[in-house]
Image: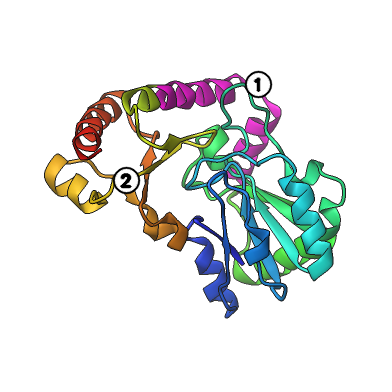
Amino acid sequence: MLPDPGYPDYRSAVAMAGAEHLALPLLDDGRPEWDAAPDDAAALYLNYPSNPVAACAPAGVFEETIAWAQRTSTWVLHDFAYGDLVFDGRRPQSFLATDGARDVGLELFSMSKSYGMAGWRLGFAIGNAELVARIEDLQNHVFAGIFMPVQYAGIAALTGAQETVEERRAIYETRRDRVLAALPGVDARCEGTFFVWFRLPDGMTCERLLEEHRVAVAPGEGFGTRGTGWARLSLATPDERLDLGVERLATALAAAL
């Protein structure tokens, strides 16, 4: 069961496992709509701070998740890839910090976001011993391991000075602030990650933004049915290009509102 809207590549895991894809609708604040969740899922993916909706974990959501998983005997996988990229004085919230989490699931962390190691394919999974053992068994039959210098680089990043993590987080928050300030009257949100999730005015589409205004954003429907009518803007863009794109976007959305 995957969040809707959610990161599209999660569906690759469903395909590789030969499993059935079920959707878990998310409310506007990013909280799962538990009443719409089927009771017969084998596994549930969650992601906070979330791609694409840029929402941090709503209060109590992990407790709700654990209670639901215990009731339905469902495994939980929490994608914590954007864990360090939270704004407005928030602190990262790990699923595993919640009582009972290790009984029902695990958490994934990627070195890509916090440490700028995108493309290195380096990360780790921790949590329930049975699930971690399953991952190790699969990986033993798929590949031999991570190139040793990359592993040493990951160790150095995790155990060394963390100033660069805060610098990266602050850059994204500053960019987020500029984007939101440039889009008054637009339903736009970003509590964390390096994305802004915003609602398109009636009649406006991402195709029109690209063709008529030369602005490229990701269509919300690509992230699930609940993403229809929304779009995702990336903050992982050089400042000059970001400001130019947001200027064009603001003009286009103001005309459509």
Q: On screen, 238 above or below 257? A: above
Left-right relation of 233 to 213 = right
Residue 79, image x, y percentages: 63, 50
Q: Dot 2 surroundings within 10 Å: few (below 14), some, or many (20 or more)?
A: many
Work out whether residue 137 or residue 9 is closer to the camera in this orientation and state it.
9
At 21% across and 53% down in the image, what residue appears? 207
The rendered magenta stretch, by its main secondary structure, is classed as helix
Question: In terms of image quadrants, where is residue 81?
Answer: top right
- Is residue 11 magenta-colored? no
- Indicate the secondary structure of the residue bearing disc 2: loop
Work out whether residue 180 or residue 136 is closer to the camera in this orientation and state it.
180
- Measure the C-alpha gap from mark 2 to mark 1: 41 Å
Labels in figure, total: 2
Q: Which residue is identified by label 2?
A: 200
**Quarter holding the C terminus?**
top left
Residue 186, image x, y percentages: 35, 34
Q: Dot 1 surroundings within 10 Å: few (below 14), some, or many (20 or more)?
A: few
Q: On screen, 31 above or below 15? A: above
| Magenta-colored span | 148-177
User: Does residue 140 appear anywhere in the picture?
Assistant: no
At 67% across and 33% down in the image, what residue appears? 92
Q: Which residue is identified by label 1?
A: 161
Q: Reading the chain from its start, which is encountered first: label 2 or label 1?
A: 1
Tag 1: amino acid: Ala
At 66% across and 41% down in the image, what residue appears? 58
- Indicate the secondary structure of the residue bearing disc 1: loop
Answer yes or no: do the residues labelled 2 and 1 have beta carbons within 8 Å?
A: no
Question: Which tag is nearer the camera, tag 2 or tag 1?
Answer: 2
